[in-house]
Amino acid sequence: MNSIEKAMNKLAQAASPVVAGEQPFTRQEHTPTGQSAEAVLVGTDAMERSMQQRTKRTITLDLERLQQRGLLVPDTQRSRIREEYRHIKRPLLMNAAGKGATVAEYANLIMVTSANPGEGKTFTASNLALSIATERDRTVLLVDADLVRPSVNKLLDFEAETGLVDYLIEDDLKLSDVLLKTNIPSLTILPAGSLHHLSTELLGSGNMRALVQEMSKRYSDRIVIFDTPPLLATSEASILASLVGQVVMVVESEKTRQSQVKEALALVDSNTIVGFVLNKIRGPLTDYYYGSGYGYGYGYGSGSGYGYGSGYGYGYGYGHSSQQ
């Protein structure tokens, strides 16, 4: 028996019989030379998944509904909340440009968090991103980094099957595969993606560190806003705080205790620029007021002295009455 006959016998022995009632796969006659039908089928499935992902990369936000929810939209007329976010974003942008009182690495990466759940961090992060998106020379990437309880998609009312988690665990995904462009030209969104039981480990991985570095340096005009879990509720938030240059702490008016804010801030590196936003203020509010205690409004600084003055959280700031 020559070598050709031996090879044919081995091929015949390895072939699987067709199960009764099933039709054999017959796409092999259309396959490229040297490529099996199964390989082409797998490749076709991958192409179909890629095409499905591409069709979902652009979303249309319902601007009228967002405005009804108290969110800023491009055509919003002059209003109290628009003015508040103009004041809130200005020092953030100055720091990102390296023109603030404190210079920090990765200052264009801004984490929005709180001490406890329900203080309004997602509302604040989304409005901050929407406000910065109106800047002429800035683009914004809003990242839902609350992998345990993602909320950006619910607040902005869109659906996305893949996102940050999928990018971190699937080597074949590119960042462009999970980013969502919106009908607001300067705003892009990175959803949280699939739920995963190792969310803390994923955020602490080398892939995540490489991602945030790429986000910071790839586009010089981009500001990245991370909506993150509350600092006292999960371990993920403190990990994320070590990756960004600025932290915005949302404090719920008349509810969050000073001790809770102190405990949360102890989890943030002392060299990180930290600011405060007082949320859910009820009753009249003047444009400027001097806060005291634990950061009424917001103040920026680093180290142990937070805010423009001395002590813990002194400075002037702004608040809004959102219930989100």
Image (cartoon, rainbow, N blue to C red):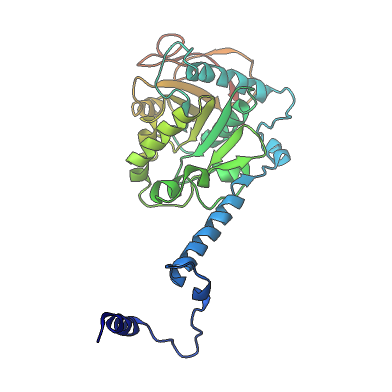
Q: Quadrant of residue 17?
A: bottom left
Residue 207 visible:
yes
Which residue lies at the image location 46% right of the left edge and 10% below the top edge? 308
Identity of the residue furthest to the front in this view: 2
- Taking depth in this image into account, of 178 and 132 the one nearest to the observer is 178
Identity of the residue furthest to the bottom in this view: 20
Q: Is the residue 91 above or below the residue 126 in the image?
A: above
Percent position (x, y) of residue 300?
46, 16
Identity of the residue furthest to the left in this view: 1
Percent position (x, y) of residue 212?
42, 34
User: In this figure, what is the number of numbered marks?
Assistant: 0
Residue 254 visible:
no
Percent position (x, y) of residue 316?
53, 13
**In the picture, which quadrant includes the N terminus?**
bottom left
- Taking depth in this image into account, of 215 and 26 the one nearest to the observer is 26
Which residue lies at the image location 33% right of the left edge and 39% below the top edge? 206
- Taking depth in this image into account, of 177 and 14 the one nearest to the observer is 14
Q: Is the residue 206 above or below the residue 105 in the image?
A: below
Q: Is the residue 257 above or below the residue 173 in the image?
A: above
Which residue lies at the image location 53% right of the left edge and 53% below the top edge? 161
Percent position (x, y) of residue 2?
26, 83
Q: Is residue 300 left or right of residue 61?
A: left
**In the picture, which quadrant includes the C terminus?**
top right
Q: Is the residue 217 above or below the residue 19 in the image?
A: above
